[in-house]
Image (cartoon, helix red, strand yellow):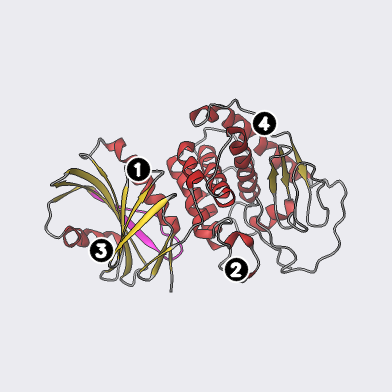
């Protein structure tokens, strides 16, 4: 029987939607030895990594969570520091700031493991996400919209940690070789296959947790930037409204204002004040994104001089979208600008063009990182609205 899934915990609940419900038992629960080993290794890695990284974005001293409590969908956890609504613990894992405890449910680990190429990654993602809530508590984070901001920030912190594991900066033997893009793809798929999640999960509601694309975008920002300081942008996040751009939906960066000129959206983020983003629908000749973007650039700039920097760079294909990017520098009446154009297309000619730019001349190669990180991460928040 297919398990219920409530992706990544922190208050996301799917209670008895797909399986029959029995009365829970409030009793100690001990998971199998493999799960215990995975959690022990993950907790050791998380404490090792974040004890050294907290100072990069917080003045608070590092503190580990008080302890870990296991439960499953048949054994209700005894929670002393937080008030839970009936059933909020089912199909879920969560962190309680009142007692500093991580409450982990192996049933959720298993549900995610069924979706992933590396099964252990499901438990690690859940654990890293809940640890992210603990980091926010230690840091004394203050969110504009507590639930959605906190959840997306925790997804971002999880992405930073997983990127460090993949780079070998922290040891986590349980994972071995794993595919981070698989994790983000899985998050994007949750809620889109087989279940009408909108009717059952509060994390789709306004002001709640955000949908799959929003959560994948937040994790991607951590994975790609490897910078926990960028995760703090989600403290400014209000309820998310995706933006319709032609045949696509687009998730804007955190704390973004959107000014519309016809079909063109001009966006600025309070979290990234030096960055300007222009988003517009495009119809290009069907085919790969790289050649389409190469041919589109002259028409896009409309005769205004713009120097293309380097070659077109192809990005990873995701959920039927292919994409490519092109750096450029432009001299304008207001001074020089440098930017990154990103074209995402379904291969049918139906496309969306993202233009990330900032004031100033073309930087040295490593100086493109902020624009490139923002561009690549944002692709995980683009999906076809057809």
Residue 323 colored in magenta in the image: yes
* Residue at numbered disc 4: 64
Q: In the current view of this chain or complex, which residue is farthest to the bottom?
A: 386
Q: How far apart are marks 3 and 1 (CA)?
A: 30 Å
**Can I make out residue 172 in this image?**
no
* Residue at numbered disc 2: 198
Q: Position of residue 235 (x, y in %)?
A: 51, 44
* Residue at numbered disc 1: 273
Please tell me whether mark 4 or mark 2 is closer to you in this view. 2
The numbered mark, 1 or 2, whose residue comes first in the sequence reads 2
- Corner quadrant of residue 193: bottom right
Q: Which of 241 and 111 is in front in this view?
A: 241
Please tell me whether mark 3 or mark 1 is closer to you in this view. 1
Q: How crowded is mark 1: few (under 14 residues within 10 Å), some or many (20 or more)?
A: few
Q: How far apart are marks 4 and 3 (CA)?
A: 50 Å
Q: Are the residues tagged 4 and 1 within 8 Å (C-beta)?
A: no
């Amino acid at each position: 029987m297919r398990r219920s899934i409530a992706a990544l915990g922190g208050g996301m609940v799917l209670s008895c939607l797909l399986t029959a419900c029995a009365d829970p038992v409030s009793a100690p629960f001990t998971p199998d030895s493999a799960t215990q080993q995975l959690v022990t290794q993950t907790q050791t890695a998380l404490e090792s990594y974040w004890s050294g990284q907290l100072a990069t974005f917080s003045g608070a001293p590092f503190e580990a969570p008080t302890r870990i409590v296991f439960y499953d969908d048949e054994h209700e956890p005894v929670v002393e520091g937080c008030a839970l609504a009936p059933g909020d613990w089912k199909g879920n894992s969560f962190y309680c700031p009142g007692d500093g405890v991580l409450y982990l449910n192996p049933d959720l680990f298993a549900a995610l493991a069924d979706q992933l190429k590396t099964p252990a990654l499901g438990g690690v993602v859940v654990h890293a996400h809940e640890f992210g809530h603990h980091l926010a508590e230690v840091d004394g984070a203050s969110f504009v919209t507590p639930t959605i901001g906190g959840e997306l920030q925790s997804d971002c912190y999880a992405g930073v940690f997983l990127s460090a594991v993949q780079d070998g900066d922290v040891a986590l033997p349980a994972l071995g070789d794993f595919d981070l893009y698989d994790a983000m793809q899985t998050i994007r798929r949750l809620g889109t296959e087989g279940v009408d999640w909108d009717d059952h999960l509060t994390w789709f509601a306004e002001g709640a947790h955000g949908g799959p694309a929003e959560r994948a975008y937040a994790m991607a920002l951590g994975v790609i930037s490897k910078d926990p300081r960028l995760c703090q942008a989600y403290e400014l996040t209000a309820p998310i409204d995706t933006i319709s751009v032609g045949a696509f939906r687009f998730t804007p960066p955190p704390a973004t204002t959107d000014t519309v000129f016809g079909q063109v959206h001009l966006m600025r983020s309070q979290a990234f004040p030096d960055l300007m983003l222009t988003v517009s629908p495009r119809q290009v000749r069907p085919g790969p994104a790289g050649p389409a973007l190469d041919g589109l650039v002259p028409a896009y700039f409309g005769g205004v001089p713009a120097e293309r920097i380097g070659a077109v760079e192809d990005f990873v294909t995701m959920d039927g979208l292919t994409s490519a990017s092109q750096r450029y520098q432009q001299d304008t009446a207001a001074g020089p600008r440098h930017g990154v154009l990103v074209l995402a297309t379904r291969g049918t000619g139906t496309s969306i063009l993202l233009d990330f730019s900032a004031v100033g001349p073309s930087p040295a190669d490593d100086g493109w990182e902020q624009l490139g990180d923002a561009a690549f991460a944002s692709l995980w928040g683009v999906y076809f609205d057809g």
